[in-house]
Amino acid sequence: MDILSLNNISQEFFLPRKLTDIVTNRPARSIRAVQSMNLAIHENEILGIAGESGCGKSTTCMIAAGLLAPTDGDVLHRGQALTAMDEQTKKTFRRSVQIIFQDPYESLNPRFEIGDTVAEGPRAMNLWPEEVIQEKVRSILAAVGLDPDRFIKRYPHELSGGERQRVGIAAALVMEPDIVFADEPLSMLDVSIRADILTLIKTLAAERKFSCVYVSHDLSILGNVADRIMIMYLGQAVEIGSAHDVLTNPKHPYTKALISAVPIPDPTIDRGVPKIIGDLSMPVNAHKGCQFAPRCPYAQDTCWQEFKSLSGVTGLHESACLREDAPDVLNEVVDAN
Amino acid sequence: MPEKSNRLIGILKVLHRQYKIMTSNTYGLIGFWVVAFFFTVALFAPVIAPYPIWEMQFDAETGQLAMLQSPSLQFPLGTTHLGYDLFSQIVMATRTTVMIGLISGFISIMIGANIGLIAGYYGGIIDEFLMRCTDVLYGMPFLPFVIILISLFGRKIEFVILAIALIVWRTSARVIRAQTISIKQRQFVTAARARGCSNLRIIYRHILPNVLPLLLLYTSFNIAWSIVTEASASFLGFGDGDTISWGGMLYELWLSGKTRVAWWWFLPPAVCIVALVTSLVFISRAYEEYANPRLRETR
Amino acid sequence: MLLDVKNLGVRYRMDGQDIHAVNRLSFQLEEDEIFGVVGESGCGKSSLIKALLRLVARNGSVTADSVNFQGQELLEMPMDQFRKDILWQKIALVPQSAMNSLNPVYKVGPQIVEAIITHKKMSERRARERVHDLFESVGLQKELFDSYPHQFSGGMRQRAMIAMALALDPKLIIMDEPTTGLDVLVQDKILKTLRRIKEDTKCSMMIISHDIAIMSEIATKIGVMYGGGFVEIAPTHDLFKDPSHPYTMGLTNAFPSIRELGKELISIPGSPPVMMREENKCWFEPRCPFATDQCRQSFPEATKTGDHHIVSCLRSADRQKLAKKAKEKATWTS
Ligand SMILES: Nc1ncnc2c1ncn2[C@@H]1O[C@H](COP(=O)(O)OP(=O)(O)O)[C@@H](O)[C@H]1O
Ligand SMILES: Nc1ncnc2c1ncn2[C@@H]1O[C@H](COP(=O)(O)OP(=O)(O)O)[C@@H](O)[C@H]1O
Ligand SMILES: [Mg+2]
Ligand SMILES: [Mg+2]
């Protein structure tokens, strides 16, 4: 069974009305951060979510982790809707779904010792007696590569960025979750130590048998860590499939552009030109069709009217492009810009 | 027991840290020692004071009532027109003033901190309600409000303390609310939520330690304000008649009509008020610098 | 030669301690070159730039044998002459997080016009025309001239800052992390713009980044920084084909590539050095799998291993053997 599934999730943020809006009686403007999203996450898989900043990746994670109530749609944890859970199930959910945060400098309480930071979750939820908690804290710190004797009494400001991120991982994993959301966990870290953290997440996921949703704007990292990849654009999921399929055989014009814009650390490879028009647009009360249409060199009238949301059925390689059935069109050489 | 001694060491460490912060600049250092001096005097007042405060004293040489005497060996700070020893009075008054300052300072910071934390954390309608209440208090003229409360409750020291505490909290509440709002948006609060911490646990375990420097700043500030308020109220004759305070001493002087002559009666309480309040403000400045390091660079 | 830096040092004094941000740093820059400087955070990239532009913070001090720009010694020049003749006119800077360096209360176009007029005798009309041209060459629409910075996206602001840097036709443009924080598609366009500008104006560029992938695309020559100095400088192709310093080898291992999905990534063990004192040894030695006793005893002088390939490693003679070993994970973990 899927561990977690999102059914037709939408999230709208309403912006404060300006005085001029009130005077002219214009309705409140809103940002559609996530729009009709379907997604299912399997046991023991690493799902990558990619997209430009502001496309709704973090919002999706917050909704899926139950920290933000969606405007529309359901989140199901092992088949049970989040909104229909009793206290006990909710507690189990809270414990089973954990987050590794982006910024290791911001996500650790500066006034907590490392040991207390890691023990805080189990203590707050009364999971185990104190001695057991201590025991688990030590073993998880060791598992993420921090010597408990040296680190348990230290404060975050005495740690390097990489060490802090390890603490963040430990604090999530000590809860023994079955799914972990990692929201850009490497973006604040130095290049030479990123690989370690990435490998750590990968091996722990395999050892401790949890699924992981790994969010990143960097497709080359996702290609390395993820089993499946979902691409988002302005709140819409535009493509999903196995990492290999999406990265080597992308179907959606946006995915194609994105992939061809990723720099390659090898000067002998020429990656070609992304086919895309203009800069990122804002999702404020956008038109109701495909959000990518204004930047898509292949857009037709229908693209502005309709949006095809992905089914979210696992295992499929799907694209939300309405012109998917005309692959030759999508591959023709158009000189955008 | 090692547990206990560990805890003791922990507490000592915290105190040492506070001392370091307070004395991190010269003014803070001066402030700290002045305040320490007054607190010591307050603590040992009955031992220090040579005479009972409401007892007429007689001149050792002439044997006459020591009326309105200027400072001498027998009466280091002189006497009042009724022959009371002013040195004993100022020492005992220190005790009263420090006590009133400390207690109403702490009560007011408790009220202010809790209202600020709760309003800031929950936001929405709770915030709206609590902050409007604070605004109403801001609309009240400070001293008349205290005086009215005292005359309603009665001129007892408990009520004086309460009346002061009930108004002094307003600034701390607003400032701590603002700080709470900014801390609440930091990621470690979301992290705490994700790990199953309840709202109260987040407020008191995660946010409170982070507003602590600000809280201490306002504690010392509130104590200063309480002392000023008490002095003002007492000077206007709204202090507790059974105890003596610095403001009360000035009130007696005023009543005696000897303001122009008895400089030894006027100066000590006035100097004490200014010295203690200024020192407390110095300490709060040191905390302010600590809470907001940017102030340090501009110096 | 455009710029010749010999034995540059930058040292900051803080809380009674010295931080040696830049140590024994030397490099040369030719005309019509894009010189990429890569290195991890804290290795002294920004300090290097600030030293060249004499913008080092007040608690910092700069030493050098020579910083020669077109025959002029930059550090020996009087400060006002440097400000008047060099800064902006000859060497322009696009600072780190340039996106936030525009003044939010003034319109973008007039801001640049103002900057031009204060540095060069030019009528306001001419300056406006110049800014219109600049907007075009960095790919900003002319209509944006009268917009405020907050109406610009991150990429557009970065373009505006590049336009500002180009305003006085400098010989050298220095950019500190020009695409950090931008999305890949925007980054791609900025890189293209930079390349086109270089073609059009024939100016040299010095671009700083922690991202070796970006450098491989845009730079003609790359300098790898570690511990406040260059450990390797080489033409881009040579650096990737023949990495000669163990740190460079480690960096290429740590980088994922979208073209090599299964590639196993290898970190460099340990963490960057804390440069509290000047040491007479290799800074990378504690993290280096190939370190010998020699490395602990003397500072590795820069040696030429190719026409334009300079390495500071005592073991550079064995570089091919080491490069092969460096590809294996066991080399770095044991
Ligand atoms: N609490 C909020 N209030 C208003 N707008 C928000 C809020 N959170 C996110 N947004 C908006 O929703 C969009 C998606 O944001 P986010 O999920 O953070 O994107 P990403 O993580 O992909 O960068 C952005 O346009 C952002 O400005
Ligand atoms: N004004 C300053 N005072 C003290 N230390 C500084 C100052 N500026 C930079 N440093 C220190 O110098 C080192 C190099 O910094 P920097 O040149 O900014 O590195 P980079 O740009 O490569 O990240 C760092 O350790 C940094 O903390
Ligand atoms: Mg995000
Ligand atoms: Mg920098």
Image (tube, coloured by chain):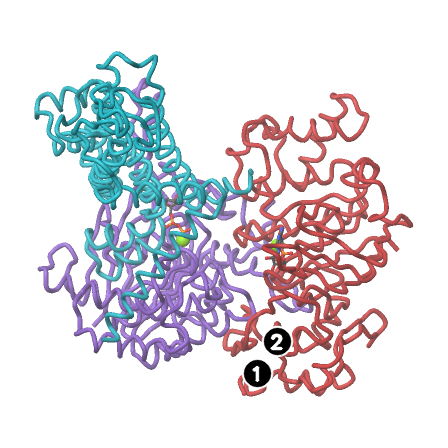
| Residue C108: image location, x then y, percent | 61, 30
Q: Residues within 10 Å of mark 1 (few under 14, many from 20)?
A: some
Q: Would you say B203 lies left or right of C233 here?
A: left
- Eyeballing the image, is A26 above or below B282? above
Q: Colour of chain B?
A: cyan
Q: Residue at x 82, y 49 (%)?
A: C75
Asked which secondary structure carries label 1, the reply is helix
Badge 2 sits on which subunit?
C
Residue nearest the viewer, comparing A258 with B244: B244
Q: Are marks 2 and 1 in contact (CB under 8 Å)?
A: yes
Badge 1 sits on which subunit?
C
Q: Quadrant of residue C93?
A: top right
Residue nearest the viewer, comparing A203 with C53: C53
Q: Which mark is residue C250?
A: 2
Q: Would you say A327 lies left or right of C234 here?
A: left
Q: Quadrant of the N terminus of chain C?
A: bottom right
| Residue C154: image location, x then y, percent | 54, 43
Q: Amino acid at mark 1?
A: Trp
Asked which secondary structure carries label 2, the reply is helix
Q: Quadrant of ligand 4?
A: bottom right
